[in-house]
Amino acid sequence: MTNQGLSESELQAAAIEVHPLEEMAPPAPEVEKTEEAPAPPAPPPNLDDNSLYIHRELSQLQFNIRVLEQALDESYPLLERLKFLLIFSSNLDEFFEIRVAGLKKQVTFAREQAGADGLQPHQALARISELVHEQVSRQYSILNEIVLPELAKHQVRFIRRRNWTTKIKAWVRRYFRDEIAPIITPIGLDPTHPFPLLVNKSLNFIVELEGIDAFGRDSGLAIIPAPRLLPRVIRVPEEVGGPGANHVFLSSMIHAHADDLFHGMKVKGCYQFRLTRNADLSVDTEDVEDLARALRGELISRRYGDAVRLEVVDTCPKHLADFLLKQFNLSESELYRVNGPVNLTRLFSITGLDSHPELQYTPFTPAIPKLLQNSENIFSVVGKQDILLLHPYESFTPVVDLLREAAKDPCVLAVKQTLYRSGANSEIVDALVEAARNGKEVTAVIELRARFDEESNLQLASRLQQAGAVVIYGVVGYKTHAKMMLILRRENGELRRYAHLGTGNYHAGNARLYTDYSLLTSDEALCEDVSKLFSQLIGMGKTMRMKKLLHAPFTLKKALLDMIMQETQHASEGKPAHIILKVNSLTDAKMIRALYKASQTGVRIDLIVRGMCCLRPGILGVSHNIHVRSIIGRFLEHSRVFYFLNGGDEKLYLSSADWMERNLDRRVETCFPVEGKKLVTRVKKELEGFLTDNTQSWVLQSDGSYLRNSPSGNQNPRNVQNTLLERLGSPTAR
């Protein structure tokens, strides 16, 4: 099944109710009827039925499989295909550290809870193990049989030990002696040297030895932890390895010289392995006096959480693999044998090779709208009209410039900003520091618990405090995920507000890789709403009534359900009804049920869901009016867009929130309207691009699998990201 989306004219036409085929057929000749008892009406499907929902972790795995598939796409440059293989690894690491760890915890403590799909955690873990084993095996096959041989044709090589020349062997020996041996610490295993506590995801070797050491010990086993500061891939000089970019793995070097680390003993075997641990932080925010201090303590323990996965090289003998499993209290199903390096993510270091630009994407320069190019003062432009930016096609620089100008401008009195992921040394933080030093009232709401960015956020909090800014750590029990900035400026004796609202983080690096919307506005009502929300976050008080802004955990979920209900009402009255949603994840059962009801009534629903989607489309009588697609491409789709036809009076919102329970119920999120015909038309057109993409889009089937779209018949290939890049971005000459 393909869902090719619609052109502009078709979109308008789709607003007309679709009649069933039988109604459009010519009337059949009348036949004398015999009296039959009317069939009893079929009972309406129960929307709580488990079979109508997909398990969220299995859906997340499906997303990662789609990422892996990109490595087979020959339309991508070769190093970019390698990158997709590595992203698959990196995603899988986090999946085990958080998702699998969470499921295991439920099983261990006998707290198994099934979601809307009805699958128990132990059942989900069994299915995950089966799927991941299959896909990891595929990943290494793609690496060894397709990507590496192709790279070798372009003189990018990873030279295995068996292929080392005499020159390479001599160079490796010297490198090992000078750079590796001095900082490596082998650990012999015996009663006085128990099995060491190994850091999460670190590279280690288990070594089988023969002989008796100086103290008469003959345990026969040792562990070599690879120092974390050593590179995992080392480039060989051209005069040694020959022309091109030649590399050897650190693991190969250690393997080749393991004998040197155990003087007088014989190494029978040396095998790399890697342990993944539970990395979810468990700070009870209700019971903590100082969140920052508690987090600092917890960050250390993250490195040593419970084991959740063991990867070993596929040559590792069974008795050694079993020994490791026993040490880490893991079962056979949690063992992954791999044909290659156990940590592929370390190969990221070579994906940006300066020597091979032809194997990478053509660089581009994000565009700056003409309005802003020609202006000396960003406030004067934003003061007259809203500016909407779509990153990475359009530059993130105007957002940084707004803050920089605010830091220097003598008319600016105060700056308020939320920070979720920005990096301690970002341009955004630099500008906030400058503003504070220049005497502006700077308040930063920093979410310390942004997963895997906790350390960076603690650093930036300290940096801002030292500059004189007021730092708030969000709200107890709720993560602050909203992306907003507020600037207060005195103009002609009056105070005027300017705001930035976005769907993505204040992170210039991410703004080149993730697709996100930014709105720069001076709209009085919207800016006043942002001001109220900051007051709520920083101070205390009851929820204040907002004019335009929807915000979780207070008004957003209810407002979205009301808008779905409104479309459902229109459809039941025979009026056109259409919903388009673009989100990263759709898992909230309440929202899914509302979409099912809307579909049953006749609302046309187009969902663009990059990652997890627990809704099953295409089920007769339930979701037959719902189409779900996922776009996987050069950039990570991250923007959230909500469109409702609303009887012709269209409503269009951008948001920081996904349709997940955590976003709608347990986070502070914003959702803001796009207003003005010009901007609404623009975003709609961009949405249409996603619905008509036939090269990077995958269509969700009712069984939970995805089928990739491809142009059929005389269709032209349509790639939404390329189209936007051509329309908004400008290529950079190499």
Image (tube, rainbow, N blue to C red):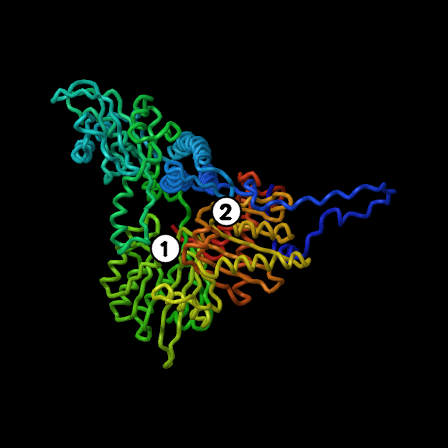
Q: Is residue 732 left or right of residue 193?
A: right
SS label for mark 1: loop
Toward the right, the furthest residue is 32
SS label for mark 2: strand
Dot 1 amino acid type: Gly
Q: Split into 4 quadrants, where in the image is the N terminus? A: top right
Q: Which residue is mark 2?
A: 631
Toward the front, the furthest residue is 110
Q: Looking at the picture, how far across and down is residue 408, in whole percent?
A: 30, 70
In this view, the residue in front, 700 or 595, is 595
Residue at 31 percent across and 33 percent down: it is 274
Residue at 33 percent across and 38 percent down: it is 347
Q: Quadrant of residue 220?
A: top left
In this view, the residue in front, 289 or 236, is 289
Give the number of the mark in front: 1 or 2.
1
In this view of the protein, can residue 698 be seen by the observer?
Answer: yes
Q: Are marks 1 and 2 in contact (CB under 8 Å)?
A: no
Marks 1 and 2, how far apart at CA: 33 Å
Toward the top, the furthest residue is 211
Q: Quadrant of residue 370?
A: bottom left
Q: Which residue is mark 1?
A: 477
Residue at 36 percent across and 63 percent down: it is 537
In this rendering, the answer to whether 269 lies above or below 52 is: above
